[in-house]
Image (cartoon, rainbow, N blue to C red):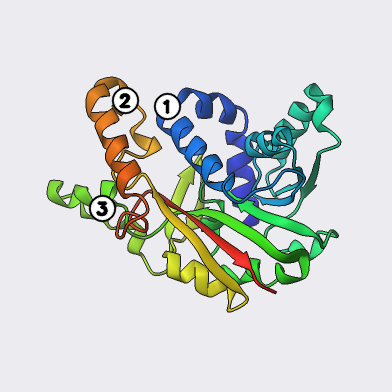
Amino acid sequence: MHTEVNTAFSKQSAYFDAYDYSNEILVYMRTQVRNHVLKFLKKDDYILELNAGTGLDACFFAEYGCNVHATDISDGMLGRFQEKLDNYPHLQSKIQIQKCSYTELNQVKTASFNYVFSNFGGLNCISNLQKVTQHLPEKLQKGAYITWVVMPPVCLWEMKDIFKGQFSSALRRFKKNGTKAHLEGEYFDVFYFTPSQVQKSFGKSFKLVSLEGMGGIMPPPSKEDFPKKYPKLYQKLIKWDEKLRYKFPFNAWADHFIITLQYMG
């Protein structure tokens, strides 16, 4: 699995930032995630980031005033990340980069993190989240927060394809043994989790603090042309999304959900 994921995302790294900046929906969602985190994050917090990619979020949080230990397994992504740091010397003392799988966090030597962050479904590349969470208590300070952005089984925008007779695409997230993802000519398994499954993977030492849907009513990033084709409708859908994203089922039935837990020690 690691080899396929590394290769796929390394190939994607060449244009990852450009696509991120050009996709209006993706820009909006990344801002939503950051605003969620900033409700709990304090300046000078020490963040452990999982699947950090090219460092878009790590650099944002470092500029905010935090220190970030950024991990990923993609050589290409980490290479782009390092190039970025080379161009921003004022961030070099705030960010450390480590090639490390989130199933091997025992390799991270620091044990005083205030925050653990993972964005945009990187954790959906594993079938058992306990392989990640088993290492966290020994790495965290009491009271530390964890914010993960995860893809759930139910995505209303995908399930509407049932009415078009496209059952395979509408129900693809429900496959028990995961579904094959295709990226840059590489195939790897992707698994989908409910908020309760994520919370259960942490155990009783962690309490749920916040849960909000992302792309429950507004279109997901894959519909990147939607804002230009239907600008008025897009703005209306955003407003409804903002009103309902904390309420069930829209906080769980979405393209992604943002879940925050706190370590009680």
Q: Label 3: how many residues lie within 10 Å, few (<14), some (14-19) or many (20+)?
A: many
Q: Which residue is mark 3?
A: 170
Disc 2 to disc 3, C-alpha distance: 22 Å
Task: Determine whether 120 is above or below 29 in the image.
Answer: below
Q: Which residue is mark 2?
A: 227
Nearer the observer, 216 or 188: 216
**Residue 52 location (% of width, % of height):** 66, 44
Position of the C terminus, as image quadrant, is: bottom right
Question: Which numbered mark, 1 or 3, is in the foreground of this view?
Answer: 1
Q: Label 2: how many residues lie within 10 Å, few (<14), some (14-19) or many (20+)?
A: some
Mark before the other along the chain sequence, 2 or 1: 1
Check disc 3 and give the amino acid type.
Answer: Ala
Check disc 1 and give the amino acid type.
Answer: Glu
Mark before the other along the chain sequence, 2 or 3: 3
Question: Which numbered mark, 2 or 3, is in the foreground of this view?
Answer: 2
Q: Label 1: how many residues lie within 10 Å, few (<14), some (14-19) or many (20+)?
A: some
Q: Which residue is mark 1?
A: 24
**Residue 80 location (% of width, % of height):** 71, 31
Mark before the other along the chain sequence, 1 or 3: 1
Nearer the observer, 192 or 234: 234
Residue located 65% across and 48% down the image? 41
Q: Secondary structure at mark 2?
A: helix
**Residue 51 location (% of width, % of height):** 64, 49
Mark on residue 125?
none
Left or right: residue 108 compared with residue 56 = right
Residue located 68% across and 44% down the image? 74
**Residue 105 location (% of width, % of height):** 74, 62
Task: Determine whether 89 is above or below 247 in the image.
Answer: above
Disc 2 to disc 1, C-alpha distance: 7 Å
Check disc 2 and give the amino acid type.
Answer: Pro
Residue located 67% across and 59% down the image? 102
Left or right: residue 74 compared with residue 18 = right
